[in-house]
Amino acid sequence: MLSWDQAHRVIGFRNSYRLYSGDVFHANGAAAQELPRATTPLPVIHYLMDGTTFTLEDYLEHQSVTGLLILKSGRILYEHYGYGNTDRTLWTSRSVAKSVVSVLVGMAIREGLIRSLDVPVTEYVPELRGSAWTDVHVRHLLQHTSGVAWNEEYGDPRSDFATLTRCEAAAQPYPCIMQLLKSLHRLPGIAPGAAWSYNTAGAWLLGLVLERAAHTTLAHFLETRLWSRVPMEADGVWQALVPGKVDMGGHGFNATLRDWGRFALFVENGGHLPNGQVLVPDDWLTQSVTWTKARGSVTPSSPDGQFGYQWWYSGVDVNRPDPEGANDTARDTFWALGIYGQAIAIDRAQHLVLVQWSVWEHAETPPSLYDEQVLFFGAVARAVREAR
């Protein structure tokens, strides 16, 4: 996957659930939660970046967008499919799945399946006792503050992430990944909770903790708690390391664009089903987007921290002009992000949601692509406000 060109990435991302073993999470066959069209269309969008004004069409081109959905108060303002995708395409999430897992953990907390975020991980995965994960708690996995050394470099074929990717393609991915986790070391002198460092191995381990606590797979937990109860429009597939037993909590969620949007609306609505039933603790969303101040999370562009419970704060780089005030919207927005441009943005203050599928040429570069996402979303929010 890391070596695909853009043409192969389009094919691969809409067929990931065919390339790997997977567990299906079913919609219940009832009429899906309605996503009506807005009575007024999306206003004309212009956004300013580095002194040049761009349009929606420019954004689709720059971001190599294969799917874009914009929702306002639960209504479709804009829906676009590119590169051969359709409203039936199941597109892979990459690390947007981490934010889905974060929500599922909140559900498990509410149900008492996970009794506390401050429980040691080894209480659920005892085979990691004596490893670098000893003394790491569930909260540390959510915040990526485990202190376990991990190289997430996507362009480095020798990185830990590249090794993880090769494990996923192996004949027996689960023991391969478990052995990788057991081989890791702690960062010297760094206690759990002290430093933030993005770690997909820890995210997979969080998913495994949930599976052990709930005695079921991520896919089945998602299906029984949320997917069949919203209900969603289509079945989805979660990449499985051991079908029916262990799913890939770091990524591997595949669903349609509108169902990504329905998931985002569930979050935007504070974890309430359309019938009003609450599935997460009352303060879960507030906790989830309270950014950690651990070393590495605080940056000039994110002075309050950039990471919560597997959700991101994303603001415009301090060195890039922001004359239209996109950062004002950014302060009310949180993001689920995956490499190659996958994204969900949620602004609860404006009841505004963006879902994006993309095939960037490189996993995370140039970083201006992230700034462009923020500038574009800020322009959408501004145009919607002004159109009232």
Image: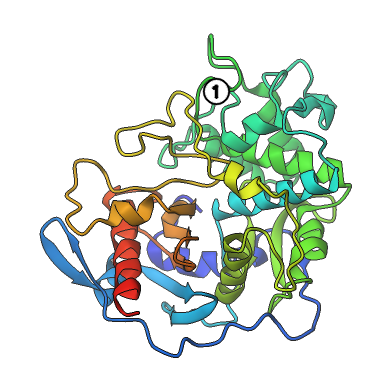
How many residues crowd mark 1 within 10 Å: few (<14), some (14–19), many (20+)? some
Above or below 246: residue 39: below
Q: Secondary structure at mark 1?
A: loop
In which quadrant of the rendered view does residue 48 lie?
bottom left
363 with respect to 294 (left or right) = left
The reply to whether residue 369 is visible in this rendering is no
In which quadrant of the rendered view does residue 64 lie?
bottom left
In which quadrant of the rendered view does residue 243 lie?
bottom right
Q: Nearer the viewer, residue 202 or 301?
A: 301
Above or below 362: residue 160: above
The reply to whether residue 110 is visible in this rendering is yes
Q: Amino acid at mark 1?
A: Ala
Residue 104: percent from the left, percent from the top? Answer: 72, 52
Instruction: Give the residue furthest to the left.
Output: 51
- Residue plotted at (56% across, 59% down): 93
Colour pattern: rainbow
Instruction: Give the residue furthest to the front.
Output: 388
Residue 223: percent from the left, percent from the top? Answer: 78, 64
- Residue plotted at (17% across, 55% down): 323
- Residue plotted at (54% across, 38% down): 161
Instruction: Give the residue furthest to the bottom.
Output: 39
Residue 278: percent from the left, percent from the top? Answer: 74, 60
Above or below 146: residue 341: below
Q: Nearer the viewer, residue 82 or 209?
A: 209
Residue where numbered disc 1 is placed: 149
Instruction: Give the residue furthest to the right.
Output: 215
35 with respect to 313 (left or right) = right
Quarter of the picture holding the C terminus? bottom left
- Residue plotted at (85% across, 43% down): 112
71 with respect to 16 (left or right) = left
